[in-house]
Structure formats: structure tokens, C-alpha cells
Image (cartoon, coloured by chain):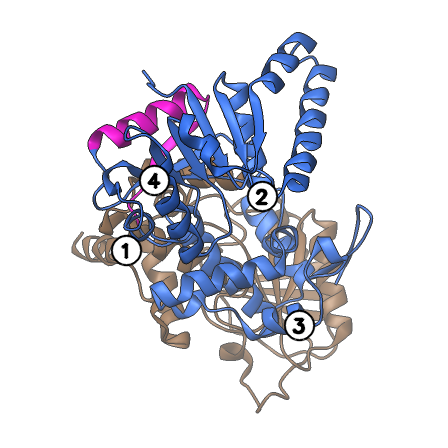
Chain colours: A blue, B brown
């Protein structure tokens, strides 16, 4: 049984943070949405309202339930407000020093029982926990995008994480209606450890002239029954994001396959960032997709 | 389009009784070699060689990047011992004739396959890309990153895959994974293709039986 009643999300003005806040509030937890700028939180609040409005339209929840969920969400730009939280989930910028600074500040604000969770996708939980002043109460909770729809959470204890912290975090995931899987505190955990090098291999195959992007995506989709090809997925993730993932992942693993391929860097330099700029491995015109 | 099949031994692309074999004619504009030596014939629209892990150049010879004719390679993708998929990887060389590529594509598409044209590189598209991922997953299993079940669940739920890497490579056969990765490792020489320990064990057990 989860002892957690109040959850705080740091970086709640971002896509991932806002999704995590939805997960928490929808499951009945009082949820504090923290970010450094109120406009980002306001934008996330509008998106959240729209998300639940669709849920009402589709008959997945009542209007009264929607109001109740929204009533459990509180927005703040004051870190001190997080003193009420039993669980703080950080989903701030994927930078070790930023995360370490945050947990260090939180340690001076939050009560001793508060658990700090990191949504990092590539960084070490142990390294983040090292700056927290409570490394036994820090755990990795890696959500998948979009967090409000995806059930999976990779749960990763750091080297000093206590059994009780892990058990509480696990119980919270289940209470929030999510499916936790346990992984070691290793770079990329399961998902990104498999996906980042694979995505890079696909980019290198384009660069090596094995086939064009449409051919590579078609082959993988037909062979495996995937709904989306790997290069289409990279376009969706953003080519700049793939570079950032590589830059976080490669120095730790020293796996040559995790290094950003030259073609990826050239495309980013050209402003071809994927769907968001209308061009990546494919061209996009609205929702229409053309071979690139 | 009429096509003839010259076959010696079992075909990985078209198991015995496959409708594609049944529909072949004694002679045709296209000739498919399933395990038989390639015979050049410029009068044909295309001559197609079924490939295993080897490159097309093994059958045609190579000429400093100028190779290519109406002889193409192909393989119907198959995960080890599982049933073949609808995917045909059609292998071309730098100077393969567009007419041969068009004819081969039309033939397979008329038979209901999806055709993807690729260069004559080891592993073609699918094995080149997925075998390192299977190796990673098998290594992670040995290193205790997570259980096999959790890795598979993570890939299914986190990426929307139909199956996870461990269950898939085990269904296809770890000894088969050894065979494919060993062939790729011989060409690329990079650690990504070195057969994973569990695949080596499976291969050694196969050798003992």
C-alpha cells in the first residue's frame, strides 16, 4: 500500500512533466506542478484541461470526475511549496548538474520522509542521488512519452536506495495505475539502452546507402509488424533530441554505436529536426508524409 | 509474369509447397535460383539468386564498384526457424539494370510480397539492424540489467512492439542467431555483431548433438 498522498512534479511545464502530473492527479493524488516559469505551467494546464475534456467527450470519465482531477492539480513557481510532498518526481532538463542542484535544494525544503524520484532517461540515479543528502530515498522512475497514455515505468534503484524507498516507489506506480519494471541503474536503463544505438544504426544504414529511409522503415515495419518505422520514430522524437541522447549516453557507455552519426549532425545543422520543422528523414506537410 | 525456378535443396524463402513455387513455369522471363549455380542469360528480364547470409557478389563476382547486371539477389525475411514474412529484400549492385529491378519488383509484388530494394551489404537491412539489438538484450540479460520478461514487456509497452527482443531471438533460435551474427561479424568486425554468449552456447550445444 502506498504511503504517498501528495506528489510534486518538477518540470511540470514540459511535455513529460505535464504528463506525469496527469498520471498522479488522475490516480487521486494531490499534485503540485512546479516549474520555473508560470507561462509554461499555464500552457501545460490548458493542455491538461484539453486532455481531460477529450476523456469526457469519449465517455472515459464524467465531467464531475474531470473537475475533481483538475482540482487536485496545483501550480507553483515556488520550490518551497514542495515541502508538502511525499514524493517529488523531477522531469527537468536532462543535465546532471541541473538535476543534482535541484535535489540538493529540495533536501533543504522537503521533510525527511519525502522520496525523490528522477525521470532521467540516460543519467545515473546514483550520481543524481549523490547530491541529494538522502541518497537512500532517491529512485529512478522513468516514464515513457506520452506519460499520460503509456503505462510503463522503468524503476531503478541507485546504489544506496533503500529497500523501503524502492517498495514505496513501486507501490506508488501501481497505485497510479502504471506498470513498473525493475532495472539496474545503468545508462539508458532498458528502453534507451536498446533504442539509442538501434536508432543510430538505422541512420548509419541510410548514410551507408543500404537503402533509402522509406525502404528501411518499410523493411522493419513489414518484418516485425511495427506501426512506425525507426526513422519515422526519430523524426517524431526530434533529430536534435536524438543528438542530445547520444551526447548523454555515449560518454558514459563508450559504445561506438551510441555516438551521434555524422549524417544526424549534418541534418540537425541544416535545421532538419524532424516533424517539428517539417523535414527530417521524411518531409511533412501537415499530417501528410512524403518519402525523403 | 512467367517465372521459372531452378532449385537444389530447401529454400528459406519458399518452403516446400509454398504457392510461389507451385505457380512457377518450366521457363519464363525471370529465372530464380534457389540453391543452384547462377547462369548468366542476358535474354532474361531478371535472374534472381536466393541469398542466405552471403552477399550477391559471392555469386556474381565484383569489379571495384562497377559490378551489376540483370542478376539480382533476394531473400524473404525470416526470423530463424519461424515462418517467412511477407518482406522480400531485393539486393542490387551498383550497376544493376533498372529493368531487372523493375521486373523483379513486379514479380514479387504480384505474388503478394512487399519488396524493398537494398544494396549488396552484409545482413541487408533487417539482420544488419536487428542483430546488434538482440546481442545487446542477451548481454543485458547476462549482466542482470533486468529479467528477460521485463525487457520484453518494456519493449512491448514502451515502444509498442509486438514482441520483445529476447522472446523473438529465442523463437527464431539462438543457434541461428549465432550463425547470422558470426557471418556479419566476419564482414564488419565490430563488437556489435560478435555473437552473444548465449548464442555461442546454443551453437556449441547444437554441435554436440
Q: Quadrant of the N terminus of chain A?
A: top left
Q: Which residue is mark 3?
A: A269
Instruction: Indicate which label's residue lies in the foreground, 1 or 3.
Output: 3
Circle 1 SS class: helix
Query: x, y percentage for residue A265?
Result: 59, 71
Q: Same subunit under labels 1 and 2?
A: no
Picture disc at residue A108: 4
Picture disc at residue B199: 1
Circle 2 SS class: loop
Mark 1–mark 2 Cα distance, whole angstroms, equals 25 Å
Query: x, y percentage for residue A236?
Result: 65, 50
Earlier-in-chain disc, 3 versus 4: 4
Q: Same subunit under labels 1 and 3?
A: no
Q: Is residue B162 magenta?
A: no
Q: Which residue is mark 2?
A: A226
Q: Is residue A175 magenta?
A: yes
Q: Same subunit under labels 2 and 4?
A: yes
Mark 3, other Cα within 10 Å: few <14 / some 14–19 / many ≥20:
few
Instruction: Indicate which label's residue lies in the foreground, 1 or 4.
Output: 4
Residue in the picture at 32% in, 66% down:
B194
Residue in the picture at 35% in, 56% down:
B136
Query: x, y percentage for residue B42?
Result: 72, 79
Earlier-in-chain disc, 3 versus 2: 2
Q: A220 and B155: which one is in front? A: B155
Q: Are marks 1 and 4 in contact (CB under 8 Å)?
A: no
Amino acid at each position: 500500500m502506498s504511503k504517498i498522498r501528495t506528489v510534486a512534479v518538477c518540470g511540470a511545464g514540459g511535455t513529460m512533466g505535464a504528463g506525469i502530473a496527469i498520471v498522479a492527479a488522475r490516480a487521486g493524488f494531490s499534485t503540485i506542478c512546479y516549474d520555473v516559469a508560470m507561462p509554461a505551467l499555464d500552457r501545460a494546464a490548458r493542455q491538461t484541461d484539453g486532455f481531460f475534456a477529450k476523456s469526457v467527450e469519449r465517455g472515459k470519465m464524467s465531467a464531475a470526475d474531470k473537475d475533481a482531477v483538475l482540482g487536485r492539480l496545483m501550480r507553483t513557481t515556488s520550490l518551497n511549496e514542495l515541502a508538502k510532498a511525499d514524493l517529488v518526481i523531477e522531469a527537468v532538463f536532462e543535465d546532471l548538474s541541473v538535476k543534482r542542484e535541484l535535489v540538493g535544494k529540495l533536501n533543504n525544503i522537503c521533510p525527511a520522509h519525502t522520496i525523490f524520484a528522477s525521470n532521467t532517461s540516460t543519467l545515473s540515479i546514483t550520481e543524481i542521488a549523490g547530491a541529494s543528502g538522502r541518497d537512500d530515498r532517491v529512485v529512478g522512475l522513468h516514464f515513457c512519452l506520452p506519460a499520460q497514455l503509456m503505462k510503463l515505468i522503468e524503476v531503478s534503484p541507485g546504489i544506496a536506495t533503500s529497500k523501503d524507498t524502492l517498495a514505496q516507489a513501486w507501490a506508488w506506480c501501481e497505485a497510479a495505475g502504471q506498470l513498473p519494471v525493475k532495472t539496474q541503474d545503468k545508462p539508458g536503463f532498458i528502453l534507451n539502452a536498446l533504442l539509442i544505438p538501434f536508432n543510430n544504426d538505422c541512420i548509419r544504414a541510410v548514410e551507408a546507402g543500404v537503402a533509402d529511409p522509406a525502404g528501411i522503415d518499410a523493411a522493419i515495419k513489414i518484418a516485425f509488424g511495427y506501426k512506425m518505422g525507426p526513422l519515422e520514430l526519430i523524426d517524431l522524437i526530434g533529430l536534435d533530441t536524438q543528438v542530445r541522447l547520444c551526447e548523454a549516453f555515449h560518454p558514459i557507455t563508450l559504445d561506438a554505436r551510441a555516438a551521434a552519426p555524422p549524417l544526424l549532425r549534418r541534418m540537425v545543422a541544416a535545421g532538419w529536426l524532424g516533424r517539428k520543422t517539417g523535414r527530417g528523414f521524411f518531409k511533412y506537410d501537415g499530417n501528410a508524409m512524403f518519402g525523403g | 509474369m512467367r517465372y521459372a525456378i531452378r532449385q537444389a535443396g530447401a529454400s528459406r524463402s519458399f518452403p516446400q509447397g509454398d504457392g510461389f513455387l507451385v505457380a512457377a513455369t518450366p521457363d519464363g522471363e525471370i529465372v530464380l535460383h534457389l540453391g543452384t549455380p547462377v547462369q548468366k542469360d542476358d535474354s532474361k528480364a531478371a535472374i534472381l539468386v536466393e541469398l542466405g547470409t552471403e552477399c550477391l557478389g559471392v555469386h556474381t563476382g565484383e569489379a571495384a564498384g562497377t559490378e551489376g547486371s540483370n542478376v539480382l539477389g533476394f531473400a524473404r525475411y525470416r526470423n530463424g526457424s519461424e515462418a517467412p514474412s511477407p518482406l522480400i529484400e531485393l539486393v542490387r549492385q551498383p550497376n544493376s539494370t533498372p529493368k531487372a529491378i523493375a521486373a523483379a519488383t513486379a514479380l514479387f509484388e504480384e505474388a503478394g510480397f512487399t519488396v524493398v530494394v537494398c544494396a549488396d551489404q552484409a545482413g541487408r537491412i533487417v539482420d544488419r539492424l536487428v542483430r546488434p539489438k538482440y546481442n545487446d538484450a542477451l548481454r543485458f540479460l547476462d549482466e542482470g540489467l533486468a529479467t528477460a520478461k521485463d525487457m520484453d514487456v518494456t519493449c512491448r509497452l514502451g515502444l509498442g512492439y509486438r514482441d520483445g527482443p529476447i522472446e523473438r531471438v529465442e523463437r527464431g533460435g539462438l543457434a541461428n542467431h549465432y550463425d547470422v551474427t558470426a557471418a556479419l561479424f566476419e564482414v564488419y568486425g565490430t563488437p556489435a555483431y560478435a555473437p552473444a554468449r548465449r548464442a555461442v552456447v546454443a551453437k556449441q550445444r547444437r554441435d554436440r548433438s
